[in-house]
Image (cartoon, rainbow, N blue to C red):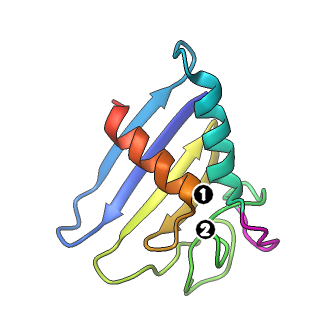
Amino acid sequence: MRIEVRRTGGFAGIERRARVDTRDLPDADAWHRLAEAALTGDTGDAGATTRDGARGGCPHGGTGAREAGPRGVGARGAGVPDGFHYEITVDGRTAHCAEPDLTEAQRELVSRVLREGA
C-alpha cells in the first residue's frame, strides 16, 4: 500500500509532501487499518466523499468542515485562516481535509507519514 500526504497552507504557506510504502514494513497491517479509517472518516457522515466518489473525507462536510464549494471531486474545506490543508492519497483514493476538522485517524496518519515518510 502506498500512502501519500501533501500538506499546504499554514502561516508561511510552505508545502510539505511525504509518502510511505507499507509493502515491507513489519507493522503494515496497522498502517492499512489507519489509512482505511482516515479515508472513510469514521464519523457516519453519509455525504462525505473522496475524490473517487467513495465515502470519506473530513467529518463535517465532505472534504472539510465549513466547506465553501460542492462536496466531492476536487473540493477543499475552507478550514481556518493560516491552518493546514491536507491531501491524503492511499493507492489512488484521495481525501481532502483541513484543520481543525481532521478525525483522529486522519490526524494520526498525517503525523506518521510526515514523520516517517520520505
**In whole angstroms, how far apart are the C-alphas of marks 1 and 2?**
8 Å
What percent of the width, then of the height, locates residue 65? Answer: 57, 80
Instruction: Assess whether residue 111 is covered by the magenta stretch.
Output: no
* Residue at the outermost left position: 12
Mark 2, residue position:
58
| Left or right position of 103 against 13 | right
Observer-nearest residue: 78 or 60?
Answer: 60
| Left or right position of 114 against 92 | left
Magenta residues span: 43-49
Q: Quadrant of residue 55?
A: bottom right
Amino acid found under the numbered disc labelled 2: Cys
Badge 1: residue crowd in 10 Å (few <14, some 14–19, many ≥20): many
Looking at the rendered image, the disc whose residue lies closer to the viewer, 1 or 2, is 2
Instruction: Assess whether residue 47 is covered by the magenta stretch.
Output: yes
Disc 1 + disc 2, Cβ < 8 Å: yes
Badge 2: residue crowd in 10 Å (few <14, some 14–19, many ≥20): many
| Left or right position of 85 against 37 | left
Residue 55 higher or lower than 92, as above or below: below
Q: Main secondary structure of the magenta part?
A: loop
Q: What SS does tag 2 mark?
A: loop
Q: Quadrant of residue 2?
A: top right
Mark 1, residue position:
95
Amino acid found under the numbered disc labelled 1: Ala
What percent of the width, then of the height, locates residue 11? Answer: 20, 73
Q: Residue at x 33, y 74 (%)?
A: 83
Q: What SS does tag 1 mark?
A: strand
